[in-house]
Image: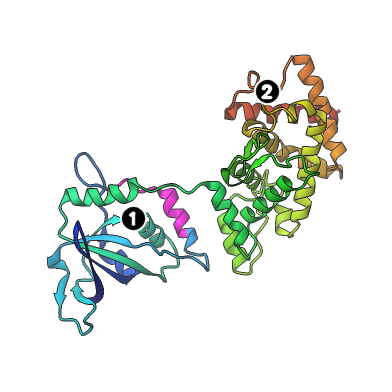
Amino acid sequence: MKKIYMLEVRQPIGTFYVGRMSADDVIAISKVSRREGRDGHQRQLKEKRAKEIALYCQDPDATFPTPVILSVDKDDFVLEDSPIPELSCFSYNENSKIAEILDGQHRIAGIMKSDNRNFDLPVVVMFNLKEEQKAYVFSTINGNQVKVDRSLIYDLFDLSESRSPYKTCHQIARIMNSEEASPFYRRLKMLEKKTRASETISQSTFVTNLCELISNSPQEDAIQIKRGKTPKLGKDSGKLVFRKYFIDNRDDVILRILTNYFNAISVVFDKEWSDPDNYILTKSVGFEGLISALGTLIPAGEKIGDLSEDYFKNIFLELKVVFANEQLDFSSICFPSNSQSASRISKLIIDAHSKIYNK
């Protein structure tokens, strides 16, 4: 039998207890009652989320400050005399599945998958709950959560002392949005707040799409850097065309290439770039198509030793000819706001490149 000392808390639902248990102890005594038919209350386990938490456990700064909430029968948590007046002492069988997880199943599943279980976890123990009370606790906790905006999450990477793919992309976004010479000057909605009519692309859209050219696993790269290790290039780097520059700490090169690229299209398609009311070039669908094409254009430019603004400008001049011949423009009529349009824009740019450089 193990003992645990807990603080008593009184609330309208009743009295419950707050304490601390090792992750292994929680794993040893806990189970999950998932919703099947009319029984259980928990959602199905999302393996992807559990794997993300398992990876997060490797982070030197990993933390789980919110409690795992357990429902326990009072017969399985026996109240004993406590030598500490402010705390209640309970004894329990550490080899029996006596606790049902009301909140925290993904944290526990992730820790179970991780090589690092060296965690103490805050726990809340609630006694003798009826099934309807369990369901109410679960639905209240999970139904009232407000999802944090991705732009705020990316913006907070600016406070990190160590490098990461997200921090690099966030800093590039801020520079390109704040410098007058930048093609994206005052065009990004930082923190999702639109303060000017010219701000047509969200910070999260910019960072998310740019990061896809740097890393397949930004969290894993960040953990490696925190541990003093250098992320690997990887054999399957594919279209991670900025990865080698990130690994070599050459964020300035990434910024310069992006500036050359977007300067080129803003010059060749100047009317479309300056008129977001009538054209999609500086909206999400246009940006996603443009950034996707870089997966092909950058390796091709590196082969000939040219990633200058003129290199990209030649491609867009050819694209302009294609648009004229096929009676296309960057309006929402030709390119509705969807992923298919972004893919089509990317393909048209890549085809224009092929017509010039594959001759």
Q: In the visual, does 295 lie left or right of 68?
A: right
Relative to the observer, which residue lies in front, 165 or 159? 159
User: Disc 1 to disc 2, how far (Cα)?
Assistant: 48 Å
37 relative to 276, above or below: below
Q: Majority secondary structure of the magenta segment?
A: helix
Q: Residue at x 80, y 48 (%)?
A: 256
Q: Is residue 45 magenta?
A: yes
Q: In the visual, does 289 lie left or right of 146?
A: right
Residue 105: image tag:
1
Q: Residue lying farthest front? A: 195
282 relative to 206, above or below: above
Q: In the visual, does 156 lie left or right of 114?
A: right
Q: Residue at x 39, y 47 (%)?
A: 46
The answer to whether residue 23 is seen in the rendering is no
Amino acid under disc 1: Gln
Q: Indicate the position of residue 224 as horizontal and vertical percent values.
A: 60, 64
Q: Say what secondary structure mark 2 lies in.
A: loop
- Of callouts 1 and 2, the N-terminal one: 1
Q: Image quadrant of residue 289?
A: top right
Q: Indicate the position of residue 290 as horizontal and vertical percent values.
A: 70, 34
Q: Say what secondary structure mark 1 lies in.
A: helix
Relative to the observer, which residue lies in front, 14 or 312? 14
Tag 2 residue = 278
Q: Residue at x 75, y 15 (%)?
A: 326
Q: What is the span of residues highlighted in magenta in the rendered image?
A: 42-54
